[in-house]
Image: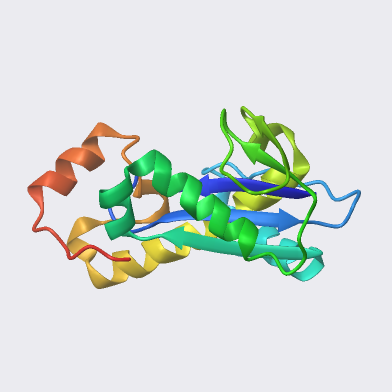
Amino acid sequence: MAGIDEAGRGPLAGARGGGGGDPPSGTTHRRPSRLEAPVRAATRSPAVDIRIHAVAWSVAWADVGEIDRLNILRATMLAMRRAFDGLSIRPGEAWIDGDRCPALGCIMRAIVKGDRDVAVISAASILAKTARDAILVELDGRYPRLRVCPQQGDMARPSICRRWRSTDPAPRTG
């Protein structure tokens, strides 16, 4: 069974990410909160553990052009499908975080808050979000005036939106 989740649904910059994972049975993962992320940076991350021990894992993207052309929801489904297709072993079932499923060609189950409640989806969430955070760290280094860091890469806080609009725009990444 694979877990599937996304990252970057409300991005100010960059691509949409999708993560898929098929961790060994009995594995439990809890997605770290944003407050825990800086503390975890000093130790081996759950993402590293998942990559080492998973039966298969994959992270894939829908780029900015695809987001513009398709819309954010369809780009999300595309990124999640690409992550599933990128798994080295084809699972017969996938559990997806959210209220809908991308077309995967297997048994699927959409689970709202699955990234919080279901270990296999939490593993996929960790992979997708840490990959997305790595892109934001790189963007922050390239465009420091934007101050885009992992905790600030989405539109969750109005102050970030104001800062984004008031700063010279950076080229889109993909």
Question: How many labels sit on residues?
Answer: 0
Q: In this picture, is 154 found above or below 90?
A: above
Asked if residue 8 can be seen in this view, the reply is no
Report the front residue among 145 and 18.
18
- Residue displayed at 52% across by 44% down: 34
Q: Position of 129 compared to 115: left or right?
A: left
116 or 91: which is nearer to us?
A: 91
What residue is drawn where x is 55% and y is 51%? Answer: 80
Name the residue located 49 percent from the left edge and 54 percent from the top edge.
79
Work out which quarter of the rendered image holds the C terminus and state it: bottom left
Left or right placement of residue 147 versus residue 27 in this view: left
Q: Quadrant of residue 54?
A: bottom right
* Residue 30 image point, x, y percent: 71, 43
Which x, y percent locates residue 4?
64, 47
Rendering coords of residue 160 (x, y %): 24, 42
Q: Is residue 104 left or right of residue 137?
A: right
Which is nearer the eye, 152 or 11? 11
